[in-house]
Amino acid sequence: MFRIKSEQMPSLPEAILVISAIIAIMSVSIIYFEAPPHIPLTISLLLLVIYGIIKKIPYEKLQEGFSEGATSGMGAVFLFFMIGILIAAWIYSGTIPTLIYAGFELVTPRFYYAIVLIVTSVVGICVGSSLTTVATVGLAFIGISQALDISLAITAGAIVSGAFFGDKMSPISDTTNMASSILKVDLFDHIRNMMWTTVPAFLIGLVIFGIISPSISTANFSEMELYQQGLLGTGLIHWYNAVIPLAVLVIFSIFKAPALLSLTAGTVSAILISFFHAVPSIGGLLGILYGGYVSETGIEQIDSLLTRGGMESMFFTIAIILLALGMGGLLFKLGIVPRLFEAVERILQSAKSVIIGSALNAIGVNVLVGEQYLSILLTTETFQSQYQKLGLANKNLSRVAEDAGTVVNPLVPWSVCGVFIASVLGVPTLSYLPFAFFCLLCPILTIFFGITGKTLTYTEAAAVNPVQLESVEKSKMG
């Protein structure tokens, strides 16, 4: 958003005061009053408008700042609508139910915690939502752990790790698409680049969970069987339901097709497969693609898992994006963010310092505000120009935003994800936090690679000699 021309440059204390007021509004509203982010965002927008009027900035300029900020998220808006349609089509055709059923087949009494991690990861990738995974499959594993009298804290740690791994690596995840689209990074390039930190974090967590898993000789897996029978009862469990749409996505990704086209192809293939089971009415199909699929198996857990998707399901996320980006546009138009950034810019003169700074910024927004969407949005918008100045490709920043933004949110007790997970699983955030190994390792690894310079990608101009580029930038510090 640094492309938005500032109408003024306030003093540093004034900028800090305005930011502090916004953080206070967001924090108190979300943490104390448990309000959805939309209301405090709207209040913050009005506060900024009033501040701008007091500073005698024409209202037309303020509206221009809001509009320019919101416009930068239109690419994400179209992708999110397509994601909602894809999810509904994949459930209706049996793609997601079949993939979830296949994941349950992995469950055995051996390496229990590791299996919990794997199954929740598979479901998370298929569903593209960490909180849905936690509230359905995760809750089933909590019930099994209670029956087996084994640690609920470790079980919850494995559930959270798997759910957020799946959310982070799923091409239908809203946070994954948000981070890539805002920075204009190809979705699948973003996912491939995240593997440098995500895969090691997952494997380390998998090994640890395997080692600390209890020895279970007999187990009551009735809760799991309930899921399997419920899924079979839908009549949608067929191998081709999963293989064909996934193969279409893989083929399109291999040829580096734009994410919108890949998602469209995946949707069309799923709709065509649905004709193998029944010939739907056009009106009914269009209703599902808009309003989402409604499961009516009679099993609450299964219905909760499969009732989702559709364009309508994306309105909540899209509203947050537009409000947050609009607020960001005003912060730049009023010179608040440029003034704050100017104060710290002198120490952000190397790739190492910029990676560390952006990671700490993403973590800080999660801790202060408790919202992962704002963490991603504010981090990417604030640090994008500095990454470009150092010749760092945008996909470095999109990776950092996810490593220190998306996966940190469930570790904060007063965050949206932290409060939700603790209430659903019945395990306090601080109890499962030490065992959410994946979420703990991702920000550590992204900072480590930033310090060492490993896995960083430079633009074509900087790639000629990134070491020399960094030494030049360091020399500016005197």
Image (spheres, rainbow, N blue to C red):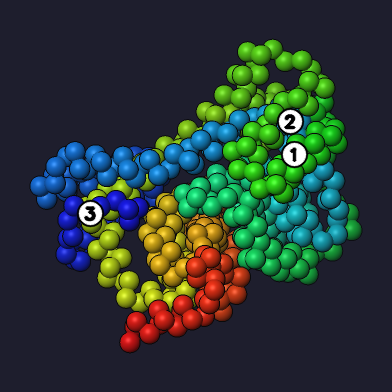
Could you tell whether 14 is left or right of 226 in the image? Answer: left
Q: Are marks 1 and 2 in contact (CB under 8 Å)?
A: yes
State the image coordinates of residue 52 (x, y, percent, origin top left).
17, 47
Give amino acid for label 2: Ser
Tag 2, which secondary structure?
Answer: helix
> Which residue is painted at 61% across and 25% down in the image?
289
Ranked by sequence position, the earlier of labels 1 and 3 is 3
Tag 1, which secondary structure?
Answer: helix
The CA span between labels 1 and 2 is 7 Å
> Which residue is painted at 33% across and 50% down in the image?
328
**For this rendering, which residue is in front, 365 or 138?**
365
* Residue under label 3: 6
* Residue under label 1: 248
**For this rendering, which residue is in front, 58 or 363?**
58
Give amino acid for label 1: Val
Could you tell whether 390 is left or right of 96 in the image? Answer: left
Location of residue 226 (image quadrant): top right
> Which residue is painted at 61% across and 70% down in the image?
455
Location of residue 218 (image quadrant): bottom right
**For this rendering, which residue is in front, 399 or 445?**
399
* Residue under label 2: 269
Question: Badge 3: how crowded within 10 Å, few (<14), some, or many (20+)?
Answer: many
